[in-house]
Image: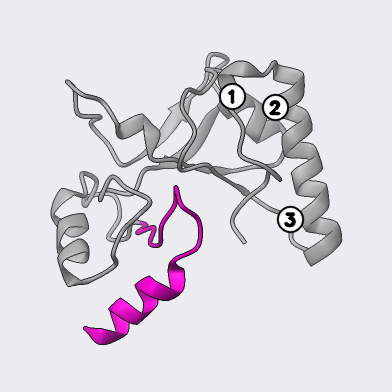
Amino acid sequence: MEKCVLTKFAYLKRGGEALVRQVIYGKRFFKTEFNKDMKILWLPDVFGYTASLPQILKKSGVDYFMTIKLSWYEYNQFPHHTFNWQGIDGTKILTHMPPEGTYNSAANPEAIKKAEAKFLDKGVSDRCLMLFGIGDGGGAVSYILKSIKAH
């Protein structure tokens, strides 16, 4: 379990209060149902984030953020995969973007080689995330696991 909200939603279409409520209700749900205090906001497929997100997350007890979308630029490559995102008030949150650049990895040897080659922060960490499955279509993890076993 790596998530502190109950649903995926478009941050730019919500006010700050709605965002805070999502995090608080999500954390409460996971604590009540699974006795887990969620420390990660896991949002691979959401476009647009408010500049106050680091502050909102830290004040809600969330220490880490993971996304893919900050790396999806047509003209400029984002210079890091792992970094401290500093919000408008100076609050920082450790942020990671999987270097493969997708949440639909095949998790096969070629994908692992690609992630290792593209990881921009090897001097900071020797680990990065690889998100496998079919993110937009849901499920399909069993298909991917069969593919991994075949290799």
Q: Give the image location of residue 144, x and y in percent.
A: 36, 71
- Label 1 sits on residue: 11
- Label 2 sits on residue: 19
| Residue furthest right in the image | 32
- Label 3 sits on residue: 37
Label 1 with label 2: CB-CB less than 8 Å:
yes
Mark pair 3, 2: CA separation = 18 Å
Amino acid carrying label 2: it is Leu
Q: How many marks?
A: 3
Label 3 with label 2: CB-CB less than 8 Å:
no
84, 81: nearer the viewer: 81
Q: Compared with residue 108, is residue 69 higher up or lower down, i.e. above or below?
A: above
Label 3 with label 1: CB-CB less than 8 Å:
no
Region of the chain picked out in magenta, as a range: 129-151
Mark pair 3, 1: CA separation = 22 Å
Amino acid carrying label 1: it is Tyr
Q: Is residue 44 left or right of residue 99?
A: right
Q: Which quadrant: the C terminus? A: bottom left
Label 1 sits on a secondary structure element that is helix
Q: Residues within 10 Å of mark 3 (few under 14, many from 20)?
A: some
Amino acid carrying label 3: it is Asp
Q: Give the image location of residue 33, x and y in percent.
A: 83, 62
> Which is nearer the N-term, disc 1 or disc 2?
1
Query: Magenta stretch: residue 133 in it?
Result: yes
Q: Is residue 15 left or right of residue 85?
A: right
Label 3 sits on a secondary structure element that is loop
Q: Give the image location of residue 112, x and y in percent.
A: 21, 65
